[in-house]
């Protein structure tokens, strides 16, 4: 995942999905899930949306500083899938152990941002 155009396209699709997930939670799940699960759903949507925007930003930073951003972009994408995906699935299925997977997505987010920072600092741009 080093082509900025592909990363931006993936991020745009992820942002559309985040909007859809937010609307789904606000309307379809409003009367189905308990308050705690609705808050969990909202957390998943927020992290999903913010990190999809971050994925776009990573692509633009890669172009600006002429960086290979494969690892940061891949880690952020992995974070979205694991963090938000596990929370979405937890809310829809009620399978409690899925909450144990969520922190791995958070670790992927942190690693992606730290790696991007290191790469920018090491760049000549």
Image (cartoon, helix red, strand yellow):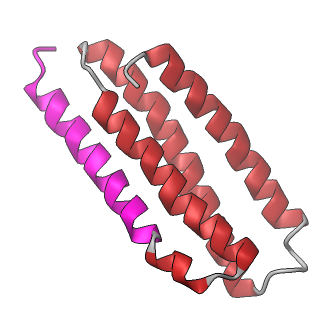
Tell me the magenta residue range.
Answer: 102-125
Task: Identify whether 94 is placed above or below 119.
Answer: below
Question: Which residue is pictured at 16% across the width and 14% down the height?
Answer: 125
Question: Which residue is pictured at 52% across the width and 19% down the height?
Answer: 6
Task: Identify whether 85 is placed above or below 58.
Answer: below
User: Which quarter of the figure has residue 31?
Assistant: bottom right
Q: Mostly what secondary structure, the magenta segment?
A: helix
Report x, y in % for residue 12: 63, 30
Task: Identify whether 34 is placed above or below 1.
Answer: below
How many marks on residues?
0
Q: Is residue 39 left or right of residue 110?
A: right
Q: Quadrant of the N terminus?
A: top left
Q: Is residue 56 left or right of residue 71?
A: right
Q: Is residue 97 left or right of residue 103?
A: right
Question: Which residue is pictured at 75% across the width and 57% down the height?
Answer: 22
Report x, y in % for residue 78: 44, 48
Q: Would you say residue 105 sits in the magenta stretch? A: yes
Report x, y in % for residue 29: 85, 71
Report x, y in % for residue 54: 45, 39
Question: Which residue is pictured at 64% across the width and 81% down the height?
Answer: 95
User: Which quarter of the figure has residue 16?
Assistant: top right
Task: Identify whether 11 is placed above or below 78.
Answer: above
Q: Would you say residue 42 sits in the magenta stretch? A: no
């Amino acid at each position: 995942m080093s082509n900025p155009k592909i990363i931006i396209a993936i991020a745009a699709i992820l942002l559309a999905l985040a909007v859809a997930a937010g609307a789904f939670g606000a309307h379809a799940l409003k009367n189905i899930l308990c308050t705690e699960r609705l808050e969990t759903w909202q957390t998943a949507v927020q992290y999903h949306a913010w990190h999809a925007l971050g994925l776009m930003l990573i692509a633009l930073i890669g172009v600006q500083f002429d960086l290979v951003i494969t690892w940061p972009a891949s880690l952020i994408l992995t974070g979205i899938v694991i963090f938000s995906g596990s929370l979405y699935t937890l809310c829809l299925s009620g399978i409690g152990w899925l909450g144990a997977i969520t922190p791995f997505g958070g670790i992927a987010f942190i690693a992606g941002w730290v790696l991007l920072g290191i790469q920018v600092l090491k760049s000549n741009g």
